[in-house]
Image (cartoon, rainbow, N blue to C red):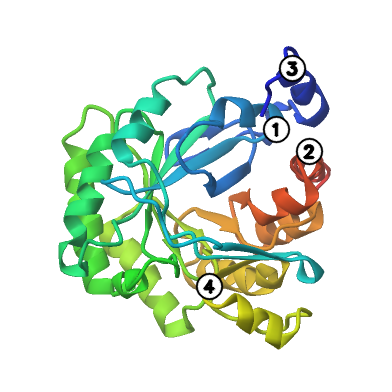
Amino acid sequence: MNALPGIGALNKKMFSVEDKRLERTLFGLTFKNPVGIAAGFDKNAVLYNELENYGFGFLEVGTATPKPQVGNPKKRLFRLKRDSALINRMGFNNLGADAIAQNLKNKKTKLIIGGNIGKNTATPNEDALADYIYNFEALHDVVDYFVVNVSCPNVKNLTKLQDTDFLSELLLKLKSINAQKSVQRPILLKIAPDLNEPQLDEIIELVAATQIDGIIATNTTTSRENLTTSKEEVEAIGNGGLSGLPLKERSTEVIRYLATKSNKAFPIIGVGGIHSAADAIEKIQAGADLVQIYTGFIYEGPKLVKAINEAILEN
């Protein structure tokens, strides 16, 4: 990514905004700015040293699983250019939690790094708890916070783990393990944009009951509404999570609902359809404390990170 000598320093000069007013302190961590890159971009923790030069304040690696897995058959990533969107069904392809942890030992940056964790596709849901515990233990010494991913639509039966009874058991178990460590890592839950209001109410109750540190809203969607791309083309692509501009409105609705209904009882990281500085400001005004980009970074490039940080300073 920064293969040529000096290119990293040049990128940093072009895209970074250094200003103490951008700092945000949440769940015991100080972020140098509130713009991060979502999980899935640097799955195996091989780019994070370079990504800091593009102006990010934090990033997430993963989704990590206990065992390495190749993911779903290719082709599994599709551009919907007219919609500034992506459909992916990657299926948690990654080198495994142990390899990711090893890669994070080469950390040369002070960038805050989160670990996004899931279960292996072959692991039945009744055994999923053990997978999350394995990832938590493997990555605990090398990440700054954890994201429990039960909302990705691209792993068979994964979203069934959004059942609140299972989530309560899982989150309380991770908190119990965390409490025994010399350093406690914040634990966040990543939720789907497709949850209805009663389900979002359950999420608010779950956060209160388990005392986890925050919510990431939202993951990709299974919806195919309001697309410019033809129905035939979309159907030919098949299953997968939709990300990008079509997700913007729903993601913001979820953020606003959680923030308002909970009376801002917990931090929210807003992600979904951020393709401009105005999109990011909208998320923050809806109740997000930090924002993450992914598809917007692919379509708009690193200038988007700088534009968002500059807009935050102006608002």
Sooner in the amino-acid sequence: mark 2 or mark 3: 3
- Please indicate whether residue 113 sits to the left or right of residue 75 in the image: left
* Amino acid under disc 2: Lys
The image position of residue 139, as x and y in percent, is 31, 35
Question: Which mark is nearer the camera, 3 or 1?
Answer: 3
Q: Earlier in the sequence, mark 4 or mark 3?
A: 3
Q: Are marks 2 and 3 in contact (CB under 8 Å)?
A: no
Q: Sequence-wise, which precedes: disc 4 or disc 1?
A: 1
Question: Could you give the CA–CA distance between mark 4 and mark 1, rounded to whole angstroms?
Answer: 27 Å
Q: Which residue is mark 2?
A: 306
Residue at 60%, 43% in the rendered image: 36
Give the distance between the C-alpha atoms of the residues marked 4 and 3, in whole angstroms: 37 Å
Pick the quarter of the image with the N terminus.
Answer: top right
Res 205 → quadrant: bottom left
CB contact under 8 Å: marks 3 and 1:
no
Relative side of 55 to 118, left or right: right
Residue 91, percent from left and from top: 43, 60
Q: Residue at x 75, y 19 (%)?
A: 7
Residue 280 higher or lower than 240, as above or below:
above
Quickly name the residue at label 3. 9
Count the labels in the image.
4
